[in-house]
Image (cartoon, grey):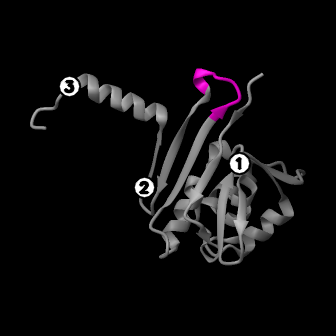
């Protein structure tokens, strides 16, 4: 059996003051983290956790104190709460669908110390499988989110090289 891994790093360290309590809670649920009160380094040694289970009381408390009621994180959480059975005691979030990109983008928008956030991941496998290796990079600015995998790079390069020299180049 092959094990697939996706070690991931986030650069630069994120100023703690730039994150809301809700954003911090979501990000530490998805990523491993190091750092103190000033900055947090987010990373994943094996993979980013894409299934979060949050206590409803904690979620409601975090929403009450959130200073940005229209942020990506607040909007996503409120949308999921509307769909939740009131008898549930926890909120399950599929972060593979929700993503962390919008959270980091809101942080970049608010933080003068950040021009962008980079998320870089390697895709590895414990067996030499053709689909088990590669990676991706995501660049998040206040205005845009760009992602490219190694497969996308190879497809673009292949197309460019097969197309031949461009006129005027």
Q: Position of residue 138 (x, y in %)?
A: 50, 49
Residue 93, placed above or below residue 153: below
The location of residue 166, given as percent across then percent down, is 16, 32
Tell me if residue 52 comes above or below residue 148 in the rendering: below
In this rendering, which labeled residue sits more in front, label 2 or label 1? 1
Q: Which residue is painted at 51% across and 67% down in the image?
A: 108
Residue 167: x %, y % from top left: 11, 32
Q: Secondary structure at mark 3?
A: loop
Residue behind mark 2: 144
Identity of the residue drawn at 64% across and 23% down: 128
Q: Decide: marks 1, 3 in contact (CB < 8 A)?
A: no
Residue that numbered label 3 is attached to: 164
Instruction: Bin the neighbour count of mark 1 within 10 Å (Cα to Cα): few under 14, some 14-19, many 20 and up.
Output: few
* Relative image position of residue 164 (x, y in whole percent): 20, 25
Which badge, 2 or 1, is on the more N-terminal residue?
1
Nearest the viewer among 60 and 54 is 54
Name the residue carrying label 1. 45
């Amino acid at each position: 059996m092959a094990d697939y891994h996706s070690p991931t790093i986030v650069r630069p360290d994120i100023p703690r003051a730039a994150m809301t309590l809700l954003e911090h809670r979501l990000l530490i649920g998805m990523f491993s983290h190091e750092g103190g009160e000033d900055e947090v380094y987010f990373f994943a040694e094996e993979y980013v956790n894409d299934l979060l289970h949050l206590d409803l009381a904690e979620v409601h408390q975090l929403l009450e104190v959130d200073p940005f009621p229209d942020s990506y994180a607040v909007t996503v959480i409120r949308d999921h709460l509307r769909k939740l059975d009131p008898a549930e005691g926890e909120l399950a979030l599929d972060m593979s669908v929700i993503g962390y990109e919008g959270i980091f983008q809101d942080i970049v928008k608010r933080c003068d110390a950040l021009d962008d956030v980079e998320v870089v991941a390697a895709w590895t496998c414990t067996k030499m499988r053709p689909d088990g290796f590669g990676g991706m990079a995501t660049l998040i600015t206040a205005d845009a989110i760009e992602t490219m995998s190694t497969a996308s790079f190879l497809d673009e390069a292949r197309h460019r090289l097969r197309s031949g020299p461009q006129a005027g180049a």
